[in-house]
Image (spheres, rainbow, N blue to C red):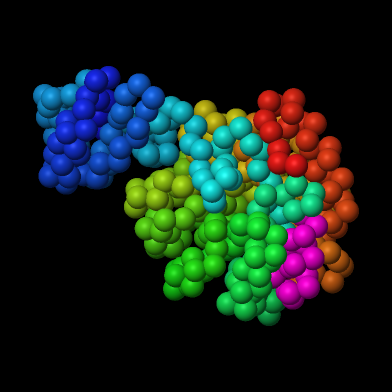
Amino acid sequence: MIIVMKKGADKEQLAAVEAKITELGYQPHVIYGETRNVIGAVGEERGKEKLQILQSMAGVENVVPILKPYKLASLEVQPEPSTIEIVPGLAIGGKEFVVGAGPCAVETREQICETAIAVKAAGARMLRGGAFKPRTSPYSFQGMEEDGLKLLAEARELTGLPIVTEVVNPRDVELVARYADVMQVGARNTQNFALLKMLGQLDKPILLKRGMATTIQEFLMSAEYILSEGNRRVILCERGIRTFETATRNTLDLSAIPVLKQQTHLPVVIDPSHGTGHSALVPAMCYAAAAAGADGLLVEVHPCPENATSDGPQSLRPEDFTAMMKKLRKFVEVCERTMAD
Ligand code: PEP
Ligand code: MN
């Protein structure tokens, strides 16, 4: 249910409604608006009619059911786009179009530091790199684990770029959170609800990738798992879905951008690297993502893609990334967004 407070409702009235929601066995989530505040009361669908009683409380304008199965992610609860702070001075979902870039996996100090310096010079605002890699084969490189996280922290120290890195296993959430600025949930874990619930308890932004066989509604339900635990900082990432097409590694669903924008206030970023699987196709998808209204990109860049331990064929060389970023600015400008220098 959404409890719409009256325009002049005061703090005490808001607190009283929150307390009543809790007493009724639901969780209150306050969304502070420009002119009025609303409270999303979420919990068990069965019996939610009892929340109608809130209608008679002081300061309450209206109590309305949320029609969508996802609640806190929906535009019904929050019509304005969410601007999610990554670190002070950097937010996704606002005016700035934010690009995160870096290798698929952290391999060596030299590799991650060299990449970080290059992507920063080209205008990237976040450094990506996996220390825990969810590989299709158990015989493939699985990541450097904590040593990789330490190297990411060194690269952050060197460049000032916040780091986005994946957590694969719920038992590593605490460890990864000690290093990461943004916790990435990979496509293979989009519906790992135990992991999502744990991430919902962190005070850190979560970059949630769309599963390769996940509908948009299921994707938003996964976001809801994180939001319902109290963490509001969820960034959605489209990275391609499985179709019959084999010319590309996945089929990058760019229509997911406007579809998501019709349904949620959460920011949307595009990963054109996993979305296509081929570095030559990446720049076109970067431009298209900006033109379609995405809030940012997550791009794989490697100083020497032919020697990469994972995803070399889809990784841009630093010079190609730089050229892409230069052209990207024009698309971003047309869309009335900004990009860092
Ligand atoms: C990655 O970002 O390197 C990755 C494994 O992506 P995905 O989960 O989208 O396959
Ligand atoms: Mn990868």
User: Is residue 39 at all visible to an observer of this figure?
Assistant: yes
Residue 31 position within the rendered picture, expressed as x and y whole percent measured from the top left: 34, 35
Residue 17, quarter of picture: top left
Q: Quick one: quadrant of the N terminus? A: top left
Instruction: Tell me if residue 337 comes above or below residue 300 in the rendering.
Output: above
| Magenta part of the chain | 103-119
In the rendered structure, the answer to whether residue 11 lies left or right of residue 74 reads left
Residue 81 position within the rendered picture, expressed as x and y whole percent measured from the top left: 49, 32
Secondary structure mainly formed by the magenta segment: helix
Name the residue: 50% across, 53% down: 206
Q: Quick one: quadrant of the C terminus? A: top right
Indicate whether residue 246 is drawn in magenta: no
In the rendered structure, the answer to whether residue 216 lies left or right of residue 307 reads left
Indicate whether residue 108 is drawn in magenta: yes
User: Is residue 196 at all visible to an observer of this figure?
Assistant: no
Name the residue: 42% across, 34% down: 74
Residue 137, quarter of picture: bottom right
